[in-house]
Amino acid sequence: MFRHLRTKLTVLYAGLFGVALLLVSLAVYTAISTNARGVVRGELLASGAAFDRIWAMRAGQLQTGAGLLSRDFGFREAVASRDEATIRSALENLRVRMDIDVAFIVGVDGQVIGGDPRALSTAGSQIMRAVDTEDAPSGVLVIGGTPYQTIAAPILSPTLVGWVVFATKLDKGEMTALERLSAIPLDAAVLGRNTSNGWTGPGGATALFGGAPPASFSKLVDKALAMKTPEPSDFSTPTGDALALVKPLKAIGDGPPGALVLSYPMARAMAPYEPLLVMIVLTGIAGIALLTGGSWMLARSVTRPIQALDEAAQRLQRGENAAVTVETGDEMGRLAESFNAMASEIRERERRITHLAMHDAETNLPNRLSLERAIETLAPQAAADGEVVVFATLGVDRFLHVRGAIGYTLAGALMSEVGSALQRLRPGDPIGRISNGIVGVAFRVRDLDEARRIAAHLQQALEGPVHLGKHTVDVTLTVGLAAFPEHADRPGVLINRATVAIDQARERNRKLNVFDAKAYRDPAAKLSLMSEMLGAIANGDMTIHLQPKYDLRQRRTTGVEALARWTHPDRGMVIPDEFIPLAEETGHIRTLTDHVVSLAIAQQAALAQADHAMAMSVNISGRLLSDPEFAEELLAITRSAVGEICLEITETAVIANPALALQMIDRFVSAGLKISIDDYGSGLSSLAYLKQIRAHELKIDKAFIIGMADSQRDALLVRSTIDLAHSLGLKVTAEGVETATAHALLGGMGCDLAQGYLIARPMPLEGLIAFLGRETQQPVKPVRLAATDGKAQK
Amino acid sequence: MWRLYAFVVIAFLTLRASAAHAGDIAFSLSNMRGAAVSDAVVTVYPQDFGRAESFKFDWPLEVDQKNLQFAPFVLIVPVGSGVSFPNRDTVRHHVYSFSPAKPFELKLYSRDESRSVRFDKVGVVALGCNIHDNMVAFIKVVDTPYAAKADAAGLATVRGVPAGMVQVRIWHPYLKAPNNEIVRAVMVSASGVVREAVKLDTRAAPDRRGAY
């Protein structure tokens, strides 16, 4: 919510103070208004009581006057004798003398004499009803809509002949007198109830309630009169609230009653306190302003160090100088101190880590990463100047031997020495240790020839005896060079290439060698070869050739071995040694084998069609023997074979996972497939496995057969192997039969089958059919097929 | 007791004198609350009652002023008779009446001074004293010999009334009725007493305190 702590603190403090002030103001206002109301209430009640007194006093005065008149002998005589003129004049006389508004008499028959007869039309009967219950009634009489305080006194002469009625108006003047009696300037009025138009009073009485319309004004009065005891109550008027006391005034007789209304607007009651309230509000505003300013200052002084720390922490994050100036001795100061200590430790540690990351721990020479960074910055500069960056690697010859001789510590010291010497020779150029026995240096040159000269110079300078304490080591170096960007597009690769260049130099027995890209097979190329192989399987470039297996007893070809042949559209024939190991490594051997087996079965069928029933041998990679899924697939494919299918498996294939491999071999045998142990004798030929594998055939490795002609031992081994196989119930096939001598020897030894260039090279189906056709015509001429001394192939 | 005896004797004589077939009416008067009403005047008019010849009552035709009071409060007077107003107080009195039956004024007269006034009109004459407001009395001027005033027990007996239906008028100064009088018809037997109990709606006497 708040971006800054100081804003938060300021708002919080000012807010709390504001709330407190508001509460105080409310309390003060409530107290004042309660007090004011109390004062007004008291005044209203007091004025009400005063009015009662005035009312009674006036009633008394009227009564006295009326009494006097009623007892006047002449007046009594006038009344008794119905002398109206005299009566009127007597009434008028007293009315003026006593300052009475209306005076008249009512006869015992209800007849009114004196006053305005029209205005008093109902007054006579009202007085008559009043005197029915009282001798000298008094109360409010409404004459012409105006309330009058009225009394009636009986005229006895000596019997009752009528009543003298005096009525006096309670108008503005009277009320002003009452108002003056009160301590507060309240409004007073006496109202009369008029049946037709509610409560009315002498002119302007309705102004009491802020000029409320007569209907609602009358409602207010009625409501107030409904109370049991007259209490000051609140009135809402168009001009604001007022506190008013409404006292009922008894009517004379059963006539419409009157009401005394004393009202006081609250606004007027509150007016004296207004300056106080204004003062409170002004003080409050000033207080809030002061507090806000103060809080702001305080918060600033508190948060300034925090802000400084915050900024320092951000600098630390960016790796900049993060020291904070310590200003105070309080918690903030201590925190800043701790922060500074922490920051410097972090920087020191960072420096060490960076050093470790960039240096070889053993020799303290810059490491490979450091060199890569250096080359990265060097390369664009060189390119801008039209130069190239060359990386030269200097490998200590026979480093492993040297290290074995002098130990790891001294070997490290040796490399350190060589590196230091190199740095002295090429000051300013980035050097570093690449691997155990190799140091390197990057430099800018115009061309490779210049690089060669520099490298040769370095080599010459660095070779020679190096003294390591008591020991002296004679150092010879092989130098490899690689150029950027000619040989590599990245610094890391450049260093690798230069290292490879050393290997290439040693292979070629050179002292100095520039990286030879042609001789270097890139791992990435291997992967692309595999994808090409899969493509070849799909588009038919991957085919098989068949090599005849010649039965030495029957003197004819009885079987063939299917061999994969890949004709690459650009590279021509790709030798199996190049792609088969790779296929095994990458797992694509299964696809390849499936393809070869499928082709082999198809071609076996084609041969049978050409009247040449042949046993078909296929090579199964050892890796596939641990793949049960492959086994199922193979069994499914071979089910459609028209003749015998023989799986050639190397003995070593079984060693990887003997139990599983033997189990699978058993499954193949059960399914009617033949098993042949391939390349017997080339690896770790185990008699134990020979016993366990349920094979039908043993193929003796061509190395023994080729060597047989010259080596008596090989001949012996071949003979005894044949005997061994035969005694185990296995047929024996000799591979690599290339000479007639071998052929003859094998025949003599009782070998069952022969395979090799002497018999025939692997060939496509058509060639084989032709070959077999020829064989049928000349059955006993295998030796005639002259051997060549070419490299043996399966 | 002797007065009661005398009463009976007088009544007997009267009956003897006037009619052969006559009876008495004994009125018992009370107000609405059941209290006896005194000073009510009962007058009886027989059916064939014409203009009565001169008659007299056996009470003195006199209104004393004593102790600042008139006495009696109500006096029944035959029409055409004179009434004397003797002052027996030590103070002076100023007796007056504004009643239409007989307005008169006896100006200030003192102790043992007696004035006399003739009442020759039937009606009620209210008497007052101009000096003493508390003093009030009524003179009931009647034209029938069958008249009686209720005593303190509210009893009034009219004797020797001719038998048959008669008109009875009961008047009291404070009776709530026109002219403070009610009219009744009563059947009078040839002899004996007819008892009539009448309830009178009276108002209280006006307050006459002269406090002003």
Image (cartoon, coloured by chain):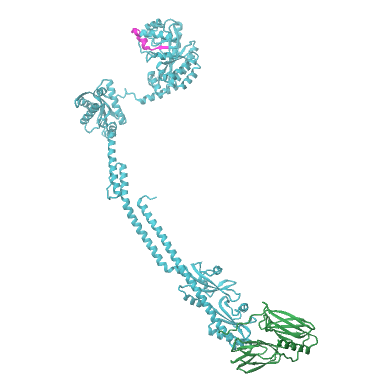
Where's residue A17, x and y in %? 38, 58
Any part of residue A40 in sight: yes
> Is A236 placed left or right of A754 in the picture?
right
What chain is colored cyan?
Answer: A
Q: Residue A578: x, y in percent?
A: 37, 20
Q: Which residues are magenta?
A: A698-713
Q: Is residue B160 above or below residue A471?
A: below
Q: Is residue A709 magenta?
A: yes
Q: Residue at x 30, y 43 (%)?
A: A316
Task: Name the residue rendered at 80%, 87% in the picture.
Answer: B20
Decide which of A135, A499 is in the foreground and name it: A135
Q: Residue A216, position in %: x, y? A: 55, 67
Does residue A303 sit above or below B171 in this rendering?
above
* In-image side of B98 versus B7 (left or right): left
Q: Is residue A535 above or below residue A122?
A: above
Farthest front residue in view: B1
Which of the 4 quarters of the picture holds residue B85? bottom right
Left or right of A473 on screen, residue B78? right
**Tint applied to chain B in the drawing:** green
Q: How many marks?
A: 0
Q: Say which of A280 and A772 sits in front.
A: A280
